[in-house]
Amino acid sequence: MKRYLLIIALLGLFEGTYAQTTKVYGNLGVENVNISVINTQYGTSTNSKGHYELPVYDRTKQINLYYSCIGYRDTIVQLTPRQLERDSINVSFRMRKQNYNLQEVGVTASRDFYRSKKGRNIADMAFLDGNIYLLENKPKASSMVVLDLEGSEIARVDYDELFEKLYIDCFNDVILVGQDSCLQVYLDERDSIMPVSVFSRELYRDKLLRIVCEFNDAYIIKTAVHDKGVFWLKYNHGKSQDFEYILKNDPKKEQKPLCSFLDTIGFVSCHSQWMSILNEYHQVVAENDGIDLINEGIWDGYMISLGETGSLLFKIHWYCSIATKKEYCILPLKFKDFLQFVDVDNHQIVEINKDFEVASRRPLKITSGEKYFKNEFLKDDATGKAYGLFIQNGVNHLGLYDATQGTVGMGQKASKVAYPKAFKVYDDYAYSVSFDSYRNQGVINRMKIK
């Protein structure tokens, strides 16, 4: 009974907390101004008359509101906790026009490239054969949409099942990835989207995700990692990564070692927490005469199943949400005669020659904007260029990667919204996906890369 009373009390506390919101509203005199709370997912945009409303749910912390619109200067407004004690705050001003010269207008032109139907968001975006593939979602259903490079719709098909992301493998197969199953589709000669096969998430994780690219008549393969969610233990805590290769003409399909990476600091930190969880789990199971899943060899990697006590559950939640949240990121980049693995977390480059030998190891040099580097690269498959991703004032910037020198520096602003839902580059354009909460539809904005 006490437990239920505690739950009811906590629910009442949460309800009271979230009920205390502040409405920020105003008139900017311009349509389609994007307003977002920096470092959060909350945002909105102005209507045709320049009006907007934005709820703020946390009144205890200072927030920064970011205002941006094509043709106007970006503006940041700071609101303190004392100001947020009010039920509503009027933030109104006139957006200042950006002064462009003719050369800048031609190079950095930006526009809303595509808008989904009402009540739909854009979950993911991919590029293949000069077309843009979109995964649009509404509650419990998904749609597959194909656009040309001018934003015109080529094909569309609706599914009753909900898919999470869009994946194009190294064989150029388009795969819709769901929670339990995956669907492979293709665009036929009559521009119709046709299903090819349905297969399990297990197959997608254990087979398709392992083949990262083709190079010199071989498949480049990485060690398998768990892809079931945050509470599944990744191989070596997700802080190491091994690569191998299989020659296409090898009848035995023998996997040969290529190169290995280890995030030493991240691995040591994760391993220390993991050993603490293991020791407590073995002790609790022994004291209760239970079945030790790990010692019996029947544990499937799902960490919640080890939560025998409240203390263990707390450690597991902390471990999965903090220590192992980000998987070690190694980016393979193919060039004419060589292959590079770029370790964007530890800033190093390993170069492989056409004989599958390590030709060199050298540092990745960030020549400008070091504190804004996001430890992420984006590859433009249409042009072969690679870009480093930087975030300044909540907005994405791109910097061109020089594969010969191993350098990347922050360049131009490449999205007009803070923290877009998806961000891709293709054919010298940067595409960013956001959700227009005022109009209840997904939006793609594209910006020309200098």
Image (cartoon, rainbow, N blue to C red):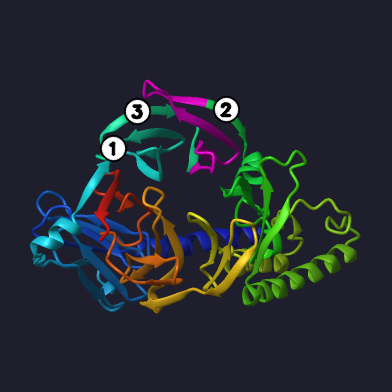
Quadrant, the N terminus: bottom right
Q: At which x and y percent is residue 361?
A: 58, 72
Report which residue position mark 2 lands on: 197
Residue 27 visible in the current orientation = no
Which element is circle 1 on?
Answer: loop
Query: For the point 25% across and 61% down, which residue is it?
Result: 450
Q: Reading the chain from its start, which is encountered first: label 1 or label 2? A: 1
**Rounded to the nearest whole Å, what is the CA distance between mark 1 and mark 2?**
30 Å
Image height check: is 177 above or below 343? above
Report which residue position mark 1 lands on: 118
Q: Is residue 178 magenta?
A: yes
User: Hey, what amino acid is under mark 1?
Assistant: Lys
User: Hey, what amino acid is under mark 3?
Assistant: Ala
Q: Residues within 10 Å of mark 3 (few under 14, many from 20)?
A: some
Q: At which x and y percent is residue 336?
A: 48, 54
User: Hey, what amino acid is under mark 2?
Assistant: Ser
Q: Is residue 334 left or right of residue 308?
A: left
Which element is circle 2 on?
Answer: strand
Look at discs 1 and 3 and give the one toward the viewer: 3
- Determine which quarter of the picture holds residue 241: bottom right
**Rounded to the nearest whole Å, what is the CA distance between mark 1 and mark 3?**
18 Å
Which element is circle 3 on?
Answer: strand
Q: Reading the chain from its start, which is encountered first: label 1 or label 3? A: 1
Q: Which mark is residue 155?
A: 3
Image height check: is 308 above or below 276? above
Q: Residues within 10 Å of mark 2 (few under 14, many from 20)?
A: few
Q: Which residues are magenta?
A: 167-195
Query: For the point 77% across and 41% down, which residue is it?
Result: 252
